[in-house]
Amino acid sequence: MIKYKTLIVSDIHLGTKASKVNQVVRFLKHNPCELLILNGDIIDGWRLKKRGKWRKKDTRFFKTLLDLLGQYNTRVVYLRGNHDEFIEEIAPLLVGNFEIRRDMILELPQTNKKYFVLHGDVFDSVTSRITWLSRLGGTGYEILLAYNKRYNRRRIRKGLPYKSVSQYWKDNVKIMVNYLSKFEDRAHDFAKLHHCQGIICGHVHKPADKMLDGIHYLNSGDWVESLSALALGFDEKWEIIHCKEPHNES
């Protein structure tokens, strides 16, 4: 049976070692929905151009989408991100229940609310204006993830639970806290400008569900660390779902 009205996932980064493809595939198989929004950075075109590698399990993700389209008649909307901006060359595209777009407005008839859905890189001044610096930052994030993996291997050997070094950095290091705050402020202003009651983003790899001065801000997180998705029930209430499967599974 279909469990959710809408699911939103983002930042899977297929083609990279850090991508938790197996987890997201199992999550989608066990949580069928009427509408699935892929909110950008599903494929990491930046890494694939350099040292990334497309694997069988990356293909399995798209086979899962075909299963959802066939078995549940799920509508799938793929929105471009900055790492998979190449799909913009073929957007807009509509084939049956599969669609590629830059962004969309999600309307909730029961609550009479509108949510602007987009990846969110346009709110990141570094990504949108200085691409080379953004790519350099992506390399730094990869180094942090590699350290995080080694750090958690030691924790597992000691019987300790998984702990994200990167998440701690996002939550506590002043420069990152300020960056996230500015990102959310820009998202808030954008939603207000477009007369929407809410805005849904990805990009920053940090799931969120909060009110910002009258605007409902939601972020779907990522499938690199947080392993999270946004779910809309048939009562039109939102929730953040965290996958509880092991992070160290490749």
Image (cartoon, rainbow, N blue to C red):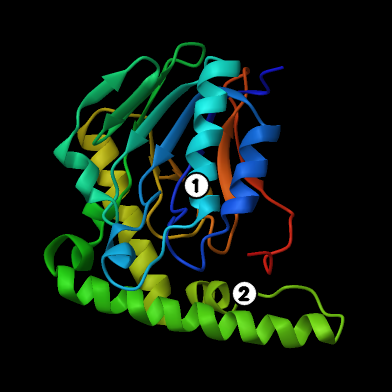
Taking the view exactly as shown, the residue that stands out farthest to the front is 56
What residue is shown at x 53% (from left), y 76% (from top)?
A: 166
The residue carrying mark 1 is: 220
Labels 1 & 2 near each other (Cβ < 8 A): no
Please indicate, yes or no, whether residue 235 appears anywhere in the rendered image. yes
The amino acid type, in three-letter code, at marker 2 is: Ser
Among the two numbered marks 1 and 2 on one chain, the one whose residue lies closer to the N terminus: 2
What residue is shown at x 52% (from left), y 35% (from top)?
A: 63
Q: Residues within 10 Å of mark 2 (few under 14, many from 20)?
A: some
Taking the view exactly as shown, the residue that stands out farthest to the top is 109
Left or right of 106? Residue 7 is right
Q: Position of residue 218 (x, y in %)?
A: 46, 43
Above or below, 68 against 88 in this view is above
What residue is shown at x 26% (from left), y 27% (from top)?
A: 195
Q: Quadrant of residue 50?
A: bottom left
How far is mark 1 from mark 2, CA to CA?
17 Å
Q: Quadrant of residue 47?
A: bottom left
Dot 1: element: loop
The amino acid type, in three-letter code, at marker 1 is: Ser
Q: Residues within 10 Å of mark 1 (few under 14, many from 20)?
A: many
The residue carrying mark 2 is: 164
> Foreground residue, 207 or 64?
64
Left or right of 170? Residue 43 is left
| Quarter occupied by the N terminus | top right
Number of marks: 2
Q: Position of residue 183 (x, y in %)?
A: 32, 58
Above or below, 136 against 154 in this view is above
What's the mark number on residue 14? none
Left or right of 168? Residue 51 is left
> Foreground residue, 240 or 67?
67
Dot 2: element: loop
Q: Position of residue 29 (x, y in %)?
A: 66, 34
